[in-house]
Amino acid sequence: MIALKYDFASIEAKWQKRWLEEKTFHCENHSSKPKFYALVEFPYPSAAGLHVGHPRPYTAMDVIARKKRMDGCNVLFPIGFDAFGLPTENFAIKNHVHPAVITKRNIENFTRQLHMLGYSFDWDRAIDTTDPSYYKWTQWIFLQLWKHGLAYKTTMPVNWCTSCKCVLANEEVVEGVCERCGAPVVRKEKSQWMLKITDYAQKLLDGLDAVDYIERVKTQQRNWIGRSTGAEVTFKATTGDDIVVFTTRPDTLFGATYMVISPEHPYVKQWAGQLSNLAEVEDYVAAAARKSDFERTELAADKEKTGVMLQGVRAVNPVNGREIPIFISDYVLASYGTGAIMAVPAHDTRDWAFAKKFGCEIIEVVSGGEDVQKAAFTAKDDTGILVNSDFLNGLTVREAIPVITKWLEEKGIGHAQVNYKLRDWVFSRQRYWGEPIPMVYCEKCGWQPLPEDQLPLLLPEVESYEPTDDGESPLSKMTGWVNTTCPCCGGSARRETDTMPQWAGSSWYFLRYMDPHNDKALASREALDYWGQVDWYNGGMEHTTLHLLYSRFWNNFLHDIGVVPYAEPYAKRTSHGMILGKNPHYVGSFETQAEKDEMLRKYGNQALRPSVKMSKSLGNVVNPDDVIRDYGADTMRLYIMFIGDFEKTATWSDEAVKGCKKFLDRVWNLSEKLQDGADYSPVHETAIHRTIKKVSGDIENMKFNTAIAALMSLVNDFYAKGLTRGDYRTLLLLLSPFAPHMAEELWESLGYAAEAGGMACAQPWPAYDEAKTVEAQVTLAVQVGGKLKGTVTVPVDSDDQTCVEAALSLDKVQKLLDTMQVVKTIVVKNKLVNVVMKPR
RNA sequence: GCCGGAGUGGCGGAAUUGGUAGACGCCCGGGACUUAAAAUCCUGUGGGAGUAAUCCCGUGCCGGUUCGACUCCGGUCUCCGGCACCA
């Protein structure tokens, strides 16, 4: 009857096998229960296997999914593999193995590791983005985008990673280097497929209002989309050309004392014949073009402005007819707004810096700040009053903007305008291991989509996956595959040889889980309607501006064309903090000053951080396989949930893992101390009701660490005062989402399974009675003047008078009364009594 | 520079709407069991003074509001994350 030893290895293997064989966590697309869709970001199956970072979000959502099942929900908790991508391809090149072979091997390894952690995924729904039956639908979505004018091919300067030999999306370039490999990114003119995510900028912004995302995710998305409102204004050049500028401050138009256009602006070439300093201008343009993104970012940091005045052409300020000079400068970006600005040095810090350097006039048009000759005054609210501005004088900035905008519209020289920082999505990659883009180019008919009945367009077998130095995809060398016939005229044509970026497959995978084996549609309408939105999606902050934005875009689009029932794919989004490793170079871990100095000299500021990202080179990587082997999956799961605030970064500690193992041992050993009785022990009743309440609420709020602390407290109570079978039963159920293998083993071996007729994970979640969470007696804090002097025990909900009398009877309080008198008393029900005194 | 978030013991971290700061765990000390050790169980543990009862100081720093502040307000410093010449 009593389990003898906590042999976690065999227990965990036993239950993992049973869950798989009995399809315990299989779910159907129909049920009388309420549905709940819990989603984690599916992993990229790297050769290195699962990292300890993975179990944090996976365990968290597994705990939530398990609890939701016990709450009586029909839970969809799926997993899959986002398997296209560069690391696999690079590994393939190096080792001369097909990427598909490596992918299969890696997926098997990941699957093994995920099973070992006891996750309650519905494995029948597992997907793989590299499976043709999956990417058929990725390609299908691309065709729909094309048919609706949201995919186009254009030649443009793109971000080119010099190491990956591949184009990157704007979102993949971080501080001028490749987000993935860290190699410098340069500008290169290339013909690229683009997706018009900019058409969805406003929808993606508005959609955020209706969803429950943690605030920092919303903020990051808003920043990335970067909406700004203002006006476009036309200035006449002395050549007769119109120069359109975008400004967020049309109210400062009277203060525009010069103009700046970007070095790439078409007028620079057009006006060449009229420029007396053409050589100087051309030098500047050439220098700007040579600058990499990285250099431009570096220069931006110190705000040192450069530029050249266009000698021979001037512009006219439309509000006052003044002639003003025109400069070219690379602080004006060709890719934002109209590529031209009106400069108001008195009220813009960049214009101010430029004006100071080039001696331009600075005219104050908003009063209320410091001397504009000393610094720009940029307040946009009601603190500034317009001056030197004709009909705007006397208005605040806020008032002036609509007035001037209306005036511009009436005169036909401007209009209100909204701009976004968001750029269209560069969708081509010159690599092999990705979804082929199902487009065909015909000299006569132009770009033609592959007919849908020819999908999937399979990735052909190639000899070499090596990317080419000329920037063409490895597929371009496969002439037998490239040469085809035009779907439109039947003449000879060529296939697109670029492939899709890795973000393609992950932009809609949550829809496929709803109906993963459908070969007629990406998912049936019934399945899409039944599951609706993802109820809870947890993932990393690093995906906020990439995957999260892209997938929202695709889902919004699919909604607009009537494929899916909701515009927004995720009702709720949370994020977890990273797991860091100990920094081996941390000065604090060294004894002698000499060692500390050595570390500081060698590693600089890096030596001041106790914890850093895990990496092979630092030797601080923790392999989940090792932890599971030494302590078991339940300990691993419990520790990763106990490690700290789920949303914050946390540092791995081997010692703390042992503490969690000890706790599970203590739970196990309690099974030998059970007394008969299906009811709660009177001494534990309140504590148990409280613990149920605490654990239930904490799981909902992802406060897993305090949920586990509450369970530890309860176990400590059981050790101190003994327990019944009824007490233990509830403990096992509360523990089951965190340590499911141990919970099931004890549930079965102690006979609870026979009584209840099923596994612990299939039981209803324990209920608590609010009335029973309070004790009959409460301990009140007794303060004198806000300082704690002691405690008294009174019946719960005692009236104020009873509490005060009890407090005054305390020895310490009595002593004080010798020299003091009571001024007033404050009673907080069931909490404290504060006696305020003054000297007699 | 702008937008978020955070500063609490030797360590990871707790503290519903202001109401007993340090829950829970790690480390460390003491005890029981043992020939011994490990494991386990019991117990102590913010700092300082005192034989003790007890007292004083404590949530980055300075000030304010309050009977009472980790919590609210003003100022300030530091760290982390994101964005960044976006007009």
Image (cartoon, coloured by chain):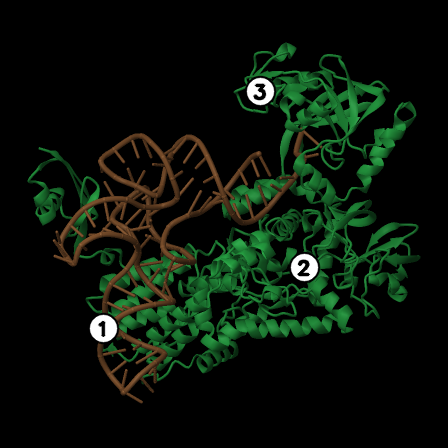
Q: Amino acid at mark 2?
A: Gly
Left or right, A692 with reference to A441: left
Q: Amino acid at mark 1?
A: Gly
Q: Residue at x 55, y 64 (%)?
A: A54
Instruction: Point out the frontmost of discs 1 and 2.
Output: 1
Q: Are marks 1 and 2 on the same chain?
A: yes
Q: Secondary structure at mark 1?
A: loop
Q: Is residue A758 visible?
A: yes
Residue extending furthest toward the top: A390
Quadrant of the image containing the C terminus of chain A? top left
Left or right, A458 with reference to A797: right
Label 3 marks a residue whose chain is A
**Quarter of the figure with residue A521:** bottom right
Nearer to me, A161 or A170: A161
Letter of the green chain:
A
**Residue on which disc 1 sits:** A722
**Residue on which disc 2 sits:** A505
